[in-house]
Image (spheres, helix red, strand yellow):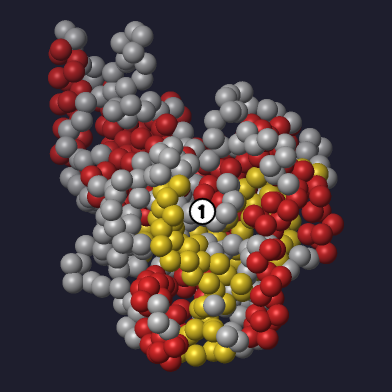
Amino acid sequence: MARAASACGVPGEPGLRAPEQLRARLGDSRAARCIVGWRRRGWADRRRAWRAGAMASWAALSPSIVEYFEGEDSYRCGYCKNESGSRSNGMWAHSMTVQDYQDLIDRGWRRCRPLQFQPSKSHKKVLKKMLKFLAKGEISKGNYEDDPMEPTMEDTVAGDFGLINKLDIQCDLKTLSGDLTESFDSEEKKKGKSPKKGASNEFIQSQDIEEKLGSGEPSHPVKMPMAPKPGKGADLSKPPCRKAKEIRKERKRLKLMQQNPAGEPEGFQAQGEPPSLFPPKANKSNQPKSLEDLIFESLPENASHKLEVRVVRSSPPSSQFKATFQESYQVYKRYQMVIHKDPPDKPTVSQFTRFLCSSPLEAENPPNGPDCGYGSFHQQYWLDGRIIAVGVIDILPYCVSSVYLYYDPDYSFLSLGVYSALREIAFTRQLHQKTSQLSYYYMGFYIHSCPKMKYKGQYRPSDLLCPETYVWVPIEQCLPSLENSKYCRFNQDPEAVDEGHSKDPDRLQVFYKKAIMPYGVYKKQQKDPGEEAAVLQYARLVGQTCSERMLLFRN
């Protein structure tokens, strides 16, 4: 387990760095790709042997036993490529309860709210691409070498505008329509043309009204998107073109609004909420499909392929996990060699086991928990009877935490990174039906300045954790600050503090010489002045609750 921070030239105390700067180094070259904040990590075999006896006798009393490594190690950052750009603080977990791990990642993580999640346009494209492949064997044309987790350009542009700018849709429809018509007329006059009447005006009104509502742009008059000059391509600062079918639908809705004798738009939402400018749709078939509808759309009986997703416990390994271990490992090895350019001798069985299979999390199966229980799992994607991808996840009391994904490079055209994230969100929603408190999906660490990590902002609604007060803040409130500074305090209340901070370090629990004692007793036996600084740093990072519940191993 480690809590890590990447300096990248920004000073700060451990645990008080910007979320987009967090990194981790846990003795494995691939760890930094997926491990951020507090992250579980298996105990190395060479360390386990000589302490196993001492730990076993105390595991029943307090399963969470950790060893903290003070100080900061500088190493090469895998994102900015600076040779000393990352610094880390960390600790090994000999064992860890799922509740302690939940509390730890809530002091250094990012989460998505899957219960309100709505797939974006690019998300829907990925799901439809998968359905076409399964149904007819169709393979979409395109560049398969791109990082499968990155969003499309249109999602990146629209997403940033939509998050940063909020539009008050309680506007005067007539004024808005007049402004748009005037804007269109001025454009036509510049070209020396007289504006067309009737249908043209109606087209401009219906199109631009929805563009304003959907894009997050301010409600002042906007110019109609013009065709790009030859050789210059599309202008990303303008709203994208729309399909004729969508334009016809909005034109019809606008007519219905204008025919309303009451002079008010139909289809009001609940009292106190802003009204919708468009009337409710007539039947269910016109309603937007849910994530589950898109994923589990029925296939024809003669479908070309069959996809099955299986969840198997990885630690302790279940019988299903053991039976599929070699096949899963071969997929991992090929993924590391092709996607990450590892030499053949690097992704060994022991490295794979240590990195993605061994886990300090204790398996728990409470009666009020999910049917599969809590702990560490592999979510295997089986296509026509063979594994093509594996998502490594932790199921915790309040969330599903995404750890890693590896897949067969031959299936890169299916955008399995995006697809697996959407399946994990749907899986979280499924678990929520049985266990109501399990209602979040943790994607790990968001790096605003790195495209390979910025894609996580496209899964909305989502929150970032304030690095000073440890409260969750909607990402749209954080983005303006991240545009201006690499380090940000997201909580805007200047009086707010970390409510879970270590208030009484003497109550911290220490495991020393096969005995459990409060830190207040332990420190009287120590003469090293640096010992107290290390323990206090640990207490500050884990907080008062975890410091009293977990055992800090000292030798």
Q: From the viewer's side, name the closer residue of 190 and 461.
A: 461
Q: Residue at x 21, y 26 (%)?
A: 223
Is residue 281 rendered to the left or right of residue 39? left
Q: Nearer the viewer, residue 385 or 393?
A: 393
Q: Position of residue 473 (x, y in %)?
A: 33, 61
Q: Where residue 215 sits in the image (x, y, percent)?
A: 32, 39
Identify which residue is drawn at 65% across, 45% down: 406
Residue 174: quadrant of the picture: top left
> Going by the image, does 397 lie left or right of 173?
right
| Label 1 residue SS | loop
Q: In which quarter of the image is residue 378?
A: bottom right
Residue 521 place in picture, x, y as percent: 43, 92
Q: Where does residue 394 sit, x and y in percent of width and height?
A: 60, 63
Residue 250 lies, with reference to residue 294, above or below; the image says above
Q: Can residue 269 be seen in this view?
A: no
Residue drawn at point x = 52 percent, y = 49 percent: 32
Q: Nearer the viewer, residue 399 or 394?
A: 394
Q: In this view, does 44 lie above or below 371?
A: above
Residue picked out by circle 1:
25
Q: Which residue is drawn at 43% across and 66% down?
A: 70
